[in-house]
Amino acid sequence: MSDASDFAATPPVIELVDVDKVYRTGEIEVAAVRGVTLAIDEGEFVAIVGPSGSGKSTLMHILGCLDVPTAGGFRLSGHDVGSLDENQLADIRNVFVGFVFQQFNLLADLTAWRNVELPLVYAGIDPDERRARALAALDRVGLGDRANHRPGELSGGQQQRVAIARAIVTEPAMILADEPTGNLDSRSSADVLDVLVDLHAEGRTIVLITHERDVAARAGRVIELRDGEVWDPNADLEHAGVRP
């Protein structure tokens, strides 16, 4: 007979509880993130939105283990991130999380597939396997026919898709995309978002950081930050005496 625990819900991929991030310069303190509590489940596509200075990028750095909270709890796939050392955090960044940034961060002298294989080089993967996996990742983002092109021979949208291929070549469970359409025109933005939607359909957890509402609308759930806090529109209504 099955134990009741067999039917327990899978823990969230991301779980933040009362997370603060304070930067100090001399006697000056700046609270970039304040009391953030949120959970993101496996397989969700979540957009985090807010104006410049709202704490979006700081939160993204925390989620990707590029930075650590000043206070509060952060569990990633059930693991207490606060208990991990630098080597363990690096392993998470290299294996569990795929990063996509506004700046494509491609090496100009390398072809597309050589750029994509770089995380596998750092992981010590065999050269033949690296090439095969890099080419497969480019196929998945629709750029299999551009594998031998250098970044300067590709459009901005194509370069960002190469960056996405590089992010997924290690088969990470989660993709963190920080303003991935910020440097693109509307057509290229749509192409990049289509790729992220397809990856989500394959079961990947996607966290998209953006200030653009139409971009956020492609996600399944939107979390809004204001002044470093998760904004609840119902709280404003209740304060005004209006029942949501």
Image (spheres, grey):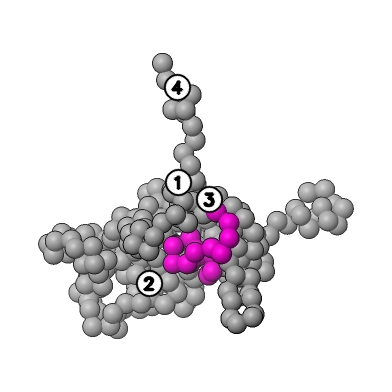
Q: In this view of the protein, which residue sits in the foreground, 24 or 44? A: 24
The residues bearing labels 2 and 3 have C-alpha atoms spaced at a distance of 28 Å
Q: Amino acid at mark 2?
A: Gln
Q: Position of residue 209 (x, y in %)?
A: 52, 65
Q: Amino acid at mark 4?
A: Asp
Q: Position of residue 66 (x, y in %)?
A: 44, 67
Check disc 4 and report the residue beneath it.
3
The residues bearing labels 2 and 4 have C-alpha atoms spaced at a distance of 47 Å
Q: Residue at x 24, y 67 (%)?
A: 122
Check disc 2 and report the residue beneath it.
160
Q: Mark 1 near mark 2, Cβ–Cβ under 8 Å? A: no
With 95 as the anchor, is 193 left or right in this view?
right
Mark 2 is surrounded, within 10 Å at the Cα level, by few (under 14), some (14 to 19) or many (20 or more) other residues, namely many
Residue 213 visible to the viewer: no
Q: Position of residue 243 (x, y in %)?
A: 82, 48
Q: Secondary structure at mark 3?
A: strand
The residues bearing labels 1 and 3 have C-alpha atoms spaced at a distance of 8 Å
Counting residues from the start of the chain, the first of labels 2 and 3 encountered is 3
Give the magenta range.
57-73
Q: Mark 1 near mark 3, Cβ–Cβ under 8 Å? A: no
Mark 3 is surrounded, within 10 Å at the Cα level, by few (under 14), some (14 to 19) or many (20 or more) other residues, namely many
Check disc 1 and report the residue beneath it.
78
Residue 97 drawn above or below residue 114: above
Quarter of the image for residue 195 reads bottom left
The residues bearing labels 1 and 2 have C-alpha atoms spaced at a distance of 31 Å
Label at residue 15? 3
70 within the magenta span: yes
The residues bearing labels 4 and 1 have C-alpha atoms spaced at a distance of 21 Å
Q: Secondary structure at mark 4?
A: loop
